[in-house]
Image (spheres, rainbow, N blue to C red):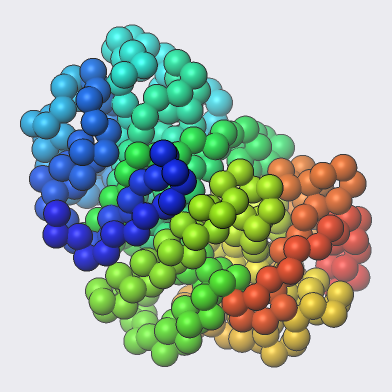
């Protein structure tokens, strides 16, 4: 396989590779087929919007059909609308009707919502079947498809029902980014910024110097480097703490307030946009607690602005939005494990009450 980069997620017997590069359909299918091994069938779950917009999907499915038995496609509702329990029921009913057994497998194709859906369906169908992912957005490549956290949303909040279930392979085909809308690219870059603040400060320097076009395009070599660096950050953290018992919590930088904003918007805010705003919230609260500096917050705001991401945090933080922080999945009793950034590439985990969070922003 002509992979530009291959990064291992080291989890012992459940290790897998993330392939990053521009691949032919046959190369993608070969990597997935090798990782899945002997199967009785493959259900390809694909975001219906990706099917409609990308010419790369059909050749991949055809190549999978040439290598694996009983390959069938099932279209998921576009975007975040597929991340509900009713949609998981629709998918698993279809899997059962198609006769997929415990030696069957799932391949998820799409953005972060579709890969989350595919992973969660694989986790719960017949108590767990193998799955592989082909992320088609920048955000899914650098974050959602790696690490084995799968989930769907409830009306109360984002990702409140889920499971840890690791894929057997992830193929990040950068060719999908050629037709990705600029807003989606910007949203993915927010997660790259997050990786820079929590672990790899060089990412921030690269983004600050990169020649970003008005439509958010970057040179292919830079994109490949950004994806690889972000995946390495996540792979290293996940290998150390698979089930978020300790260090893995740093990957939630910007997510506590970000998830509240995203859910309150009815998912009109893209995940990366909400995370960018959430990082500004975390940096602001960190300043108030003596963690971090005004210069660090200013650097984040300037970089997010440079990338075309929203930074208008204050007017979005209504009491109703902040009330959603109380259903954050990282809450333990009366406190939330909040991720602060003390310096670029350095983090600190602190228990913070939802009351303190609300008081800080409503006072500010």
Quarter assignment of residue 74 = top left
Q: Residue at 44% of width from left, 44% of height from top?
A: 12
Quadrant for the N terminus, please.
Answer: bottom left
Task: Depth check: give the residue in front, 221 or 317.
Answer: 221
Q: Indicate left or right for 50 with 69 as reference.
A: right
Percent position of residue 271, x then y: 54, 55
Which residue is the extreme one toward the front?
12
Quadrant for the C terminus, please.
Answer: bottom right
Q: Indicate left or right for 130 with 143 as reference.
A: left
Residue 317 in sight from this viewpoint: no
Q: Is residue 147 above or below residue 257?
A: above
Percent position of residue 166, x then y: 45, 39
Q: Residue at 54% of width from left, 31% of height from top?
A: 84
Quarter assignment of residue 363 = bottom right
Percent position of residue 120, x then y: 49, 32
Task: Depth check: give the residue in front, 97 or 266.
Answer: 97
Q: Indicate left or right for 158 with 141 as reference.
A: right
Q: Residue at 28% of width from left, 50% of height from top?
A: 171
Q: Residue at 61% of width from left, 86% of height from top?
A: 299
Q: Is residue 255 above or below residue 57?
A: below
Q: Is residue 227 above or below residue 149?
A: below
Q: Is residue 94 above or below residue 323?
A: above
Percent position of residue 46, x then y: 31, 36
Quarter assignment of residue 22 = bottom left
The number of numbered badges drawn on the structure is 0
Residue 53 in sight from this viewpoint: yes
């Amino acid at each position: 396989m002509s992979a530009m980069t291959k990064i291992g997620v080291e989890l012992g017997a459940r290790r897998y590779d993330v392939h990053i590069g521009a691949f032919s359909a046959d190369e993608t299918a070969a990597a997935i087929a090798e990782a899945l091994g002997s199967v009785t069938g493959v259900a390809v779950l694909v975001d219906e919007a990706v099917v409609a917009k990308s010419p790369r999907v059909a050749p991949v499915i055809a190549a999978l059909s040439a290598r694996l038995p009983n390959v069938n496609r099932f279209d998921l509702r576009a975007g975040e609308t597929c991340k509900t329990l009713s949609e998981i029921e629709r998918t698993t009913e279809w899997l059962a009707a198609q006769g997929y057994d415990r030696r069957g497998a799932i391949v998820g194709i799409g953005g972060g919502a579709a890969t989350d859906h595919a992973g969660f369906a694989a986790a719960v169908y017949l108590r767990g079947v193998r799955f592989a992912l082909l992320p088609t957005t920048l955000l899914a490549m650098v974050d959602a498809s790696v690490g084995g956290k799968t989930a769907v949303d409830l009306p109360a909040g984002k990702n409140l029902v889920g499971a840890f279930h690791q894929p057997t392979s992830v193929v990040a085909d950068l060719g999908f980014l050629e037709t990705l809308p600029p807003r989606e690219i910007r949203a993915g870059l927010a997660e790259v910024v997050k990786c820079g603040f929590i672990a790899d400060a060089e990412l921030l320097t690269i983004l600050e110097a990169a020649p970003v076009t008005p439509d958010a395009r970057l040179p292919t070599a830079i994109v490949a480097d950004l994806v690889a660096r972000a995946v390495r950050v996540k792979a290293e953290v996940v290998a150390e703490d698979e089930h978020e018992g300790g260090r893995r919590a740093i990957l939630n930088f910007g997510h506590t307030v970000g998830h509240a904003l995203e859910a309150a918007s009815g998912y009109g805010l893209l995940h990366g946009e909400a995370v960018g705003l959430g990082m500004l919230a975390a940096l602001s609260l960190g300043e108030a607690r003596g963690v971090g500096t005004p210069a660090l917050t200013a650097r984040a705001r300037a970089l997010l602005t440079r990338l075309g991401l929203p930074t208008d945090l204050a007017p979005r933080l209504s009491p109703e939005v902040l009330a959603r922080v109380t259903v954050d999945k990282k809450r333990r009793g009366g406190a939330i494990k909040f991720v602060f950034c003390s310096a670029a590439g350095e983090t600190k985990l602190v228990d913070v009450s939802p009351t303190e969070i609300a008081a800080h922003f409503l006072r500010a």
